[in-house]
C-alpha cells in the first residue's frame, strides 16, 4: 500500500534522526496483573514479588561479557488497544512487567539468549505471567539513545501494521509531532532481526523527564493529537499499543 500523510503541518516536520546505536536488544515482557478497567496499574503482591525476583537475576545477567545493560520495568499505564490495533487478530500489548537486555551487537543476542542466566530470568517471568512477548531486535531508527542512568518515564510502544514500510515512513512523521509537542529528544526503534518472528512490526522505546499525567496532558489535550497522530495511524492502517513504565 502507499503511504499517505493527512493534514501536514510545518510546525512538526519529519523527525531528524541520528545514527542508530550498534547494539542488540532483547525485549521480554509479561502480563501479570494488567488493569481490566481504567488503564492505571495498581500495585499487587504477585507483580511485586516477581519484580523482587527479577532484579537479582538481571544483575547476574549483566555480568555476561557481551551484555551492556539489563533494565527491569514496572508498568504505570496500560491502555487497551485502540484504533487499528483493536482488531482481534493482533496480540494486545498488556504487559505490566518488562525487561530490556542490551548487548554489544545484534550477533551477541543468540549466545546471551541461550545462556543460563537469561534462561532463568525468562523462566521466572514466564511462570508468573499469563501472557508474554519476546523480541530479538536491532535499532534501525533513533532520535538519540534512551538514558537508563536515571529515573524517568519510559515508553514501550508496540506497533502493528498492514505494511511495515508504510509504518516506518509514518513513524518518522509522528516522531516529529512528539518532538514538537512533548519535548521528546530520544528514541530507539527496535525492529525484529531478519527472519525473527514477532507479533509487532517494531517496538519504539523512549524516555521523558515528566510525570505520567504530564505526558498524557501534552498529548490528549492537543487537538492535533486526534487530527494528525490518530487520523494518520488509521488511514495508513497502523496501530500503536503504548505502555508507560518506571524502572525498578
Image (tube, rainbow, N blue to C red):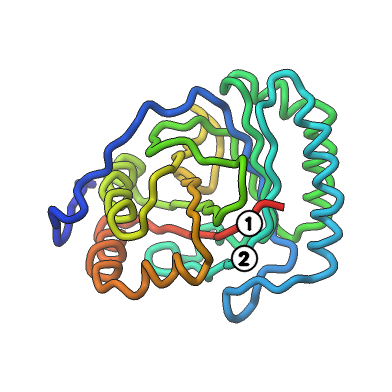
Above or below residue 181? Residue 207 is: above
State the SS at label 2.
strand
Above or below residue 121? Residue 9 is: below
Q: Which mark is residue 224?
A: none
What residue is at 44 percent from the left and 51 percent from the top? 159
Q: In screen coordinates, is 247 left or right of 55? A: left
What residue is at 84 percent from the left and 68 percent from the top? 45
- Residue located beneath label 1 in the image: 246
| Residue 73 visible | yes
- Residue located beneath label 2 in the image: 76
- In the image, 86 versus 37, the foreground residue is 37
User: Going from the N terminus, do you reach mark 1 or mark 2 first?
Assistant: 2
What residue is at 39 percent from the left and 45 percent from the top? 185
Q: In screen coordinates, is 79 left or right of 13? A: right
What residue is at 35 percent from the left and 30 percent from the top? 18
Above or below residue 176? Residue 67 is: above
- In the image, 89 versus 134, the foreground residue is 134
Local packing at callout 1 (Cα closer than 10 Å; few below 14, some 14-19, many 20+) is some
Whole-Å distance between the Cαs marked 1 and 2? 7 Å
Q: Position of residue 123 (x, y in %)?
A: 82, 44
Q: Are marks 1 and 2 in contact (CB under 8 Å)?
A: yes
Amino acid at each position: 500500500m502507499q503511504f499517505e500523510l493527512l493534514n501536514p503541518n510545518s510546525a512538526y516536520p519529519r523527525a531528524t534522526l541520528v545514527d542508530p546505536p550498534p547494539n542488540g536488544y532483547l525485549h521480554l515482557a509479561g502480563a501479570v496483573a494488567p488493569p481490566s478497567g481504567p488503564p492505571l496499574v495498581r500495585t499487587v503482591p504477585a507483580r511485586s514479588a516477581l519484580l523482587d525476583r527479577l532484579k537479582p537475576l538481571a544483575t547476574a545477567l549483566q555480568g555476561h561479557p557481551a551484555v551492556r545493560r539489563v533494565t527491569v520495568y514496572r508498568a504505570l499505564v496500560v491502555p487497551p488497544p485502540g484504533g487499528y490495533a483493536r482488531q482481534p487478530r493482533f496480540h494486545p500489548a498488556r504487559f505490566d512487567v518488562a525487561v530490556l537486555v542490551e548487548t554489544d551487537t545484534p550477533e551477541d543476542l543468540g549466545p546471551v539468549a541461550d545462556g543460563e542466566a537469561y534462561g532463568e530470568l525468562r523462566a521466572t517471568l514466564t511462570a508468573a505471567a499469563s501472557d508474554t512477548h519476546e523480541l530479538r531486535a536491532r535499532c534501525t531508527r533513533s532520535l538519540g539513545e534512551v538514558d537508563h542512568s536515571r529515573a524517568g518515564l519510559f515508553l514501550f510502544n508496540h506497533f502493528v501494521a498492514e505494511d511495515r514500510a508504510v509504518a516506518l515512513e509514518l513513524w518518522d512523521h509522528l516522531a516529529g509531532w512528539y518532538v514538537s509537542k512533548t519535548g521528546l529528544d530520544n528514541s530507539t526503534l527496535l525492529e525484529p532481526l531478519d527472519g525473527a518472528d514477532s507479533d509487532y512490526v517494531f517496538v519504539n522505546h523512549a524516555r521523558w523527564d515528566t510525570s505520567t499525567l504530564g505526558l498524557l496532558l501534552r498529548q490528549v489535550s492537543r487537538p492535533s493529537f486526534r487530527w494528525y497522530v490518530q487520523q494518520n495511524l488509521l488511514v495508513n492502517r497502523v496501530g500503536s499499543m503504548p505502555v508507560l513504565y518506571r524502572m525498578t
